[in-house]
Amino acid sequence: MTVAMAPKQRLHGLDLSRYFALAGMVLVNFRLAMQPATPGNTWLEGLFHFLEGKASATFVVLAGLGLVLATRTQEATAARWWTLRRALFLLAIGIPNLLIFPADIIHYYAMYFLLAVPLLRSGPAALLTAMLAVTATSLWALLHANYSQGWDWSTLHYTDLWSLSGFIRNLLFNGFHPILPWLALFLYGMFLAHLPLQRSSTQWKLIGFGFLAAIMASAIAHWGQGSTLAWLLGSTPIPPGPVYLVIGIAFASIAIGICLRISSLWPHGAWNFLLPAGRMTLSLYIAHILIGMGVLEALGAFDGSHSLAEVAMASSIFLVLATISAWAWSLKIKQGPIEMGMRWLTKVR
């Protein structure tokens, strides 16, 4: 791929891909919270299995991409200070959210932002080198440390999360979205920000690369089934082995490439209705926990008696209401409420 910084005008295809990444996370997280007692039909079960780990990986890749695009016109010191403030803001809302929802991703985001500060002005080669270093370190940790430490797998409960050692272990190594290796996804997004994403050739290359990488990684995962390395060569996010990492990068590449193509080919298409929600993903992510899951808990939906079809229905209802609400909000204010607060609190004065 030709390396050249993406254009300064907003790429609406990225907002569209953020929307779909959020939608996938809502489906996966509602399932995690509701713990359906009965599986769905084959296609529905396949949909949830397909989205597991891939939607959140795309979310993280887009965060890294967005960070570079947001800071590219700033002076280097100002950009680092801006990023540090955002990291602290995300940590301040992520930790309380973790008290409510154990699979919270926001406090991990804070660490990705913090660790990305020294690399803000790095070129593509340095970012790819950092990605490989994170991946290699993660693989070493998986081979030499006890990934199950702290986990009660029967309930997906992390037993010592709120001890110092347990919190650090969860954050760094074996939580839902640990620094090792999820930081590599964030760095991949930073790398993508250096590509000419407005060009159709780049978009097609992202799609082609994504499909090729997904096929190769899936073949390795299939080959590894039944072997002693099946746990390491699996395609699921727990544990996040190198094959999962490649699949996450592949899916993010495909999703971003396709959404950029859609925005290029049909600039005034009906998909524009989704853009306000795609620009308010932080607010809507918090809302799907506080409001969406809050309502479900009040209705007694967490008792494990509901079907996967009911999970899909609850997720769809929330997404429809969230999309309409974001559109209505955008008629007066372009940013979501939490995005507004973050912008005001973290601006460099």
Image: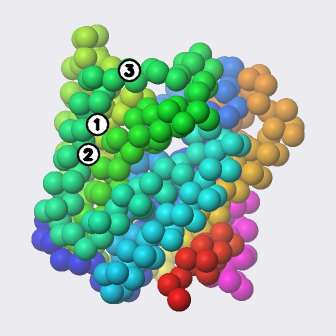
Observer-nearest residue: 249 or 347? 347
Q: Are marks 2 and 1 in contact (CB under 8 Å)?
A: yes
Q: From the viewer's perspective, is residue 79 above or below residue 103?
A: below
Observer-nearest residue: 65 or 152? 152
Callout 3 amino acid: Asn
Kindly indicate the quadrant of the structure image that contains residue 223.
top left
The earlier-in-sequence mark between 3 and 2 is 2
- Residue under label 2, please give it: 134
Magenta stretch: dominant secondary structure = helix
Mark yes or no: residue 251 visible. no
Q: Residue at x 79, y 45 (%)?
A: 294
Measure the alpha-carbon separation of dots 2 and 1: 6 Å
Residue 138's label in the rendered image is 1
Residue 189 falls inside the magenta stretch: no
Mark yes or no: residue 141 visible. yes
Magenta region: 319-335
Kindly indicate the quadrant of the structure image that contains residue 242.
top left
User: Badge 1 local density, few (<14 within 10 Å), some, or many (20+)?
Assistant: many
Q: In terms of secondary structure, where does tag 1 sit?
A: helix
Query: Residue 226, image x and y in percent?
Result: 28, 10
Query: Residue 328, image x and y in percent?
Result: 73, 76
